[in-house]
Each structure stands twice: as structure tokens, then as C-alpha cells.
Image (cartoon, rainbow, N blue to C red):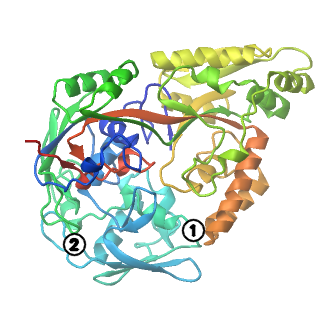
Amino acid sequence: MFYWSGAPSLTRKFSGNFFLLTVIFCCLDCGKDKNVSTTEQTLQPAYGGVLRIVAQSPESLDPIHSKNYWESEIVLQLFDGLLRFDQNLNVVPALAQNWQIAPDGRVYTFQLRSGARFHKGREVNADDFVYSLTRLLDPKSKSVDTENYSMILGANEYQAGQASFIRGLRAIDPLTLQITLKQPYAPFLRVLAQQPASVVPKEEVERSGVDFGKRPVGTGAFRLRQWNTPGEIFLASNPDYFEWPPYLEGIHIKTVPALNARDSFKDFLEGKLEMSFVPSDQIQMAQSRKEWAFLSRPILRFMYLGINLKDPLMKDIDVRKAIHFAINKAEVMGNEPDYSITNSLIPISLLGSNPAANEDVYNVKAAQEALKSSRSCRGRPPRVKLWHATASVERKGLLTRLPNNLKAIGIQVDLKILSSLNELNQKIYSGQTQLFLLGEVIDFPDPDAILNRLFNSRSKGNLFAYRNGEVDRKLREAQTSMNEDLRAQLYRQIEHQILEDHVIIPLFLAKYSFVSYKRVQGIEVSPLGFQYFPIRKVWLQHLE
């Protein structure tokens, strides 16, 4: 999903705020910290203790209604689905202990774990998953996460009110669930590993007078003990967790109306938190403290310059080439510590990634030649508008440097700053924008999550008005093929064609600087970052 590229926020559903817990964890590397000694690496996990963190106040902890990453991270601790991601982005068992896929790629059969229980004590069964996925797709639920599940057979008819149930969801017996798709969809297991596919108990969701989003009941390693609004949330360890009891006694989450890194880092310095995001001017200090663990890593989020093909001037490929060739990414990025340069659309950790094939095309002379070749300009310097949502102080610097690159080849730039992401979206979809600075959070680790969403001519997420029949055809083939090697080849071809069409200019991968006390052990994060951080594995070293 796209996000506002102002302050270092990570919003999944069009919000400009951010959750520090996400920021705290997302930059950790999947490997071990090279600064941690062998002795530290071989410590045995200890039980006990409370992890103290801070978050922006959530609105809902219902897995189909949590709209932002700070909510998603808390939800992950409370709920489970059939599957989950490991730190290397592999799909691994959660409540499904194994599964089979039919040769036609349409029928998925899951064998559930015996003995897995909801927090209130009832055992989970296949009917619970039929109910949960039906609830997710029910228009009355008003979930914004239905798109990737609509390929289930009968989902569209159910959503249109033409059927009373989804025929592709079937409980064969209490521990066997079968899901049938309309057609093969290769990323489907990865889709099922996302938070909206979590299982919920019908009797608790439909309990009279209770807001399930405020009183969530799941199967997760932690359960909600207390939620004082505003102020704090306390999650207690679930001793009956199907995997193993978590090491921590609980998680104390300080909730605040508006969160910023500087305030959280101040709390960290005062010993009120175990971990924190690090303000850019404090990175050197954070790196120097021996009792802290500091890391900075990229995650699956990138910033780009988008070009709206609805605009007559932007339909001219020579103008688009000139803009692309004119951008000096190193200069535009400046000294911002939260980004690293990218020339690719597919991040390095995903299927089909081939960063070596995508070189930086910055070339002032080539940009000037492309502009001269443009029939739209006819020798006159063009004037374009660059649109952006509310910008932080750091982003204002970037928004000065980027137009300067274009001015250097003769393109005049008018900067248009809007008050919200929603307002910017409206301008883009109505065709009023020419250039827009945005970002993309990749919801699940598959190229389909970005390439199909952004560039399929029928996708609601296609902000560029981009239409290429060959790209559409290859996207469909990549979606339906169960051959991962073929899919990787197709996605490389798709990426190459899109970059050759100059409708998007990838700029930077997001990364975050993180600090924690070294007594916090067991931190394990994938490139997906915070929303899939397994706090059940975290433990606190008890120092003498």
C-alpha cells in the first residue's frame, strides 16, 4: 500500500502517523549483530520480565480493522493465522501444521494443529477459519483488506449479495480446511500469512454489547490484559500458547496521541523503555554506547517519483526520459540517514530481484538531448508541477534538491504541498498532477504485491494511468504460474519494461536506526519489518 513520504511514518492505510514499535524493530538485520560476542550469542533464553515500549494510540485491534502499522504490530501478538513468515520471508506453519496444493494450483488443503486454543479456552477448528475469512470478505465488515482474498471461489458472488456463503471455503472436518480459488494464484500462501487472515472466535466477535476491536480475543502468544485509553496497553503472556509459552511475562505499551522519535528516545535515555528509534542527530552517540545495540537496515518500503500519464505533457516519453535522466539521486538524498539509493522496483529480498541489471541513468547531457527531442516542448522550457503531502523539515530539503535537478536541464518546477495523503490521492486520480512524490509499503513478500498493484491497467492502485498490454499479460502469467523460476524471469521482464517506459523513478529504500539495551535478546525481524515482529521470541537477560 502507498504511504505518505513526509516524516518517517509507516502507514499502511493512508495515515500520516507512525508507531514507534514498528520503527524500533524494522531495521534489525536478519542475521546476528556482528558486535555481539560469541558468549552473548550462546546465552540461554530466560523467562520473566516485561518489555516496555511506546506506541501511538490504536483505534482498533481487530485484525480486519486495524488500519495502521502500529496497530498491526500489536494485533500480531494477539492473533495467529494458518501461516506466518519467518525472518527469511519463507512461509512457515502457524495454526496449520501442514498443507497440500492440488496440481491445478486452485485447491489448498490445510491440516490444523490439534489443541490450539483461543484465549478464552475453546479449541480452534476449521469452521473458525471459514467464519473468519467470510467475515473478512463480508461487505458489512467494511474491511479495507479484501482485495487479495477476492480470488477465493465464490467471494465475488458473496460480496455482491448473490450468495449466502463462500463456496470456496469448506471445513472438511474439525481439523481440515479446504480453500478453492477461481484460478491459480501463486502468491496465495503469502497472502494467507498476512494479519487480516487471522482466526477469530465467532462467539466473541458477535457478543452483544462488546466492541471486538477494543476487547480482542485471539490465539496469540500474548492476550489483552488491560487497555486504558489513552495511556497504556498491557499484554500478558499466554501460558497455553500452542508453540511454547513466550519468555516475557508481558508487554507494557505506553500509548500517546502523537508519537515522535525524539520524545521516545528521551524516555529510552531515562530508562523508561527497552528500545527506541534514534533521531538522526543522535545516531553517533547511539553507536558509541557499549551497553546498547544499534543497527540501521532497509525494509520493504521505497520512495519514488511518479509520473501521471493523464497529463498531456507527461504522455511525451521524451519529457519523461529527460526527467528520469536529470535526477542525481545521491544529491537529492543529501545526508538523510533514513534512506539508501535504489534503481529497482523489486527489492533485493524478493523473487526476481536483479539490482545489478538496473543502473543509475543519471546523465545531464542525455536529459538535455531528450528534452530537445520532445515534440511537446518545441524548444520551449517546460513548466511542471510536483505534488507532495505534508512534509517534515528533512523532507523539505529533499523537495528543494529534487526540483533543482530538473531546473538544471531547463525544466521549471512548481512545488505543490497538500495537507493530507487523501487530498493528494484525489489530485492524482483526477489527473490534476504531473509529478508526485510518494512511497510504497510492500504488504507481503512477493513481486505481485508491488508490480501488479501499481502497474496492472485494471488495478485501483495504478496511480500513473499506465497501460501496457504486454505488461498486463505477463503479470497474469506470473500470478497463475506455480513455477517460481518462470515467475522470477517474468517479473524481471516486467520491471525492465516499466523502467524503460519511464513512468516511475525509484529513488530510495527506507531504513531506520534502532537502539536497544543489550539485555534485550531474541530480536528477530525480516525485511517486512515491524508488522511481522515476533515478540514471543524476545527475552530479557537477567543481569546480576
Marking on residue 77: none
Quarter of the figure with the C terminus: top left
Q: Could one spot residue 423 in this view of the protein?
A: yes
Quarter of image, res 433? top right
Where does the image place residue 192, in percent across and percent down from the top left? 43, 64
- Is disc 1 placed on a helix, strand or loop? loop
Q: Nearer the viewer, residue 151 or 283?
A: 283
Q: In this image, 312 relative to 300: left or right?
A: right
Task: Give the labeled residue for mark 2.
Answer: 116
- The percent position of residue 180, horizontal first and vertical second, equals 49, 77
Nearest the viewer among 439 and 295 is 295
Report the residue at 74% width, 30% height from top.
324
Kindly give the residue lying farthest to the front in the view shown. Answer: 38
Q: Left or right? Give the position of 538 relative to 83.
A: left
Decide: is 9 above or below 446.
above
Question: Residue placed at 58% from the left, 45% from the top?
Answer: 461
**Mark drawn on residue 185:** 1
Going from the N terminus, do you reach mark 1 or mark 2 first? Answer: 2
Q: Is residue 109 visible?
A: no
Mark 1 burial class by Cα count in 10 Å: few <14, some 14-19, many 20+: many
Going by the image, does 377 lie left or right of 343? Answer: right
Badge 1 amino acid: Tyr
Question: Which sits in the foreground, 233 or 456?
Answer: 233
> In x, y percent, where is residue 150?
50, 63
Q: What is the CA distance from the residue labelled 1 to the residue labelled 2?
A: 28 Å
Q: Residue at x 44, y 25 (%)?
A: 7
Q: Secondary structure at mark 2?
A: loop
Q: Residues within 10 Å of mark 2 (few under 14, many from 20)?
A: many
Q: Residue placed farthest to the left in the image? A: 544
Can you say whether 190 is above or below 250 in the image? below
